[in-house]
Every structure is written in C-alpha cells, then in structure tokens.
C-alpha cells in the first residue's frame, strides 16, 4: 500500500502553513488522511483519539481496524451534515481489516462513503486517479510491469 500527500495548508489562495501532517496513524493498523479544513480535521482527530483511548480502556482483546474507523467516520460526517454544520473535509482511511487484507475507504463532508483500490482527494481525484486506475489494471494483467502497488491513496 502506498500513501502520498502534500504538506501545505492554505488560507484562501495563500499557501500559508507548511509542514502540515495530513496522514495520521489511528489505532494499530490504520492510517487516516484528510484534505480540506484544518480546524475541522483537529475536531475529527480528537474524536478518533478519544475513541481509540476508550477502546484501549475496555481491554477486551479487540482492536478497531480500518473498516470500523471508516464506518465511524461516515457516521460522524453524516451526523454533522444532518445538523447543517458539516465538517469540510474529505477523509481517506487506509489499513488492514481483521483478516489482513488491505482496505481503502473514502468519506466526504456529506457522509458519502465508498471503497476502491485507488483513492484520491482534491485535484488528484480528477487528474491522477484515472491514470492510477489504468496503471493498476495494467499491473494486474501484466505482473511483470515495473510499477507495482496493491493499493494507492493520494491526498
């Protein structure tokens, strides 16, 4: 699995904040990345940290994986949209499910969710994703290709 993101946060059209971490580890087997409003991401990340801490305190031997975090984030985003106060972010969840298979999920500000073998947000969703899908098909049909990846995620 390959992840990639930019490190700049914009204020309007001004690239004001540099070195912003847009991919965060959540739990043991999951990465969550975002594009969009930085302050809304802080709220989302705090809620994820509280969820992980609550899960660890239960100490029942069960840990949340990428599938569970994806479902949780979809409910959070949909709930805020239903209150007419959406969180202006696009979120990508990458990790492994409990059987060890790679998992990629997408959630946007209205709670729309889907999974795929390649994901991207922003301009990457419009420009790079079609190329990545094509390359992914080529790798599956021609395994000797130089460009290999099982799943790809762009922010």
Image (cartoon, rainbow, N blue to C red):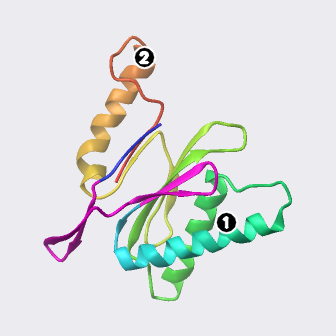
Question: What residue is rendered at 49% in x and 81% in y?
Answer: 81
| Residue range highlighted in magenta | 6-33
Image position of 4 (left or right of 8): right
Residue placed under numbered mark 1 in the picture: 52
Label 1 or label 2, whichever comes before in sequence order? 1
Of 149 and 109, the residue lying toward us: 149
Question: What residue is rendered at 39% in x and 26% in y?
Answer: 137
Question: What residue is rendered at 28% in x and 61% in y?
Answer: 19
Q: Residue furthest left?
A: 14
Residue placed under numbered mark 2 in the picture: 141
Please provide percent x and percent y for residue 61.
Answer: 84, 54
Image position of 79 (left or right of 125): right
Image position of 114 (left or right of 109): right
Q: Secondary structure at mark 2?
A: helix
Q: Secondary structure at mark 1?
A: helix
Q: Residue furthest top?
A: 144
């Amino acid at each position: 699995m390959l992840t990639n993101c930019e490190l700049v946060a914009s204020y309007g059209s001004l690239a004001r904040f540099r070195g912003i971490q847009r991919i965060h580890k959540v739990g043991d087997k999951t990465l969550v990345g975002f594009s969009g409003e930085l302050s809304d991401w802080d709220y989302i990340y705090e809620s994820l940290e509280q969820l992980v801490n609550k899960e660890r305190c239960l100490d029942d031997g069960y840990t949340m994986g990428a599938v569970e975090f994806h479902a949780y984030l979809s409910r959070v985003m949909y709930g805020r949209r239903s209150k007419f106060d959406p969180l202006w972010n696009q979120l990508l969840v990458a990790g492994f499910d409990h059987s060890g298979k790679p998992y990629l999920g997408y959630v946007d500000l209205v709670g729309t969710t889907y999974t795929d073998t390649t994901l991207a947000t922003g301009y990457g969703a419009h420009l790079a994703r079609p190329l990545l899908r094509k390359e992914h098909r080529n790798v599956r049909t021609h395994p000797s290709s130089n460009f290999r990846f099982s799943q790809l995620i762009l922010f």
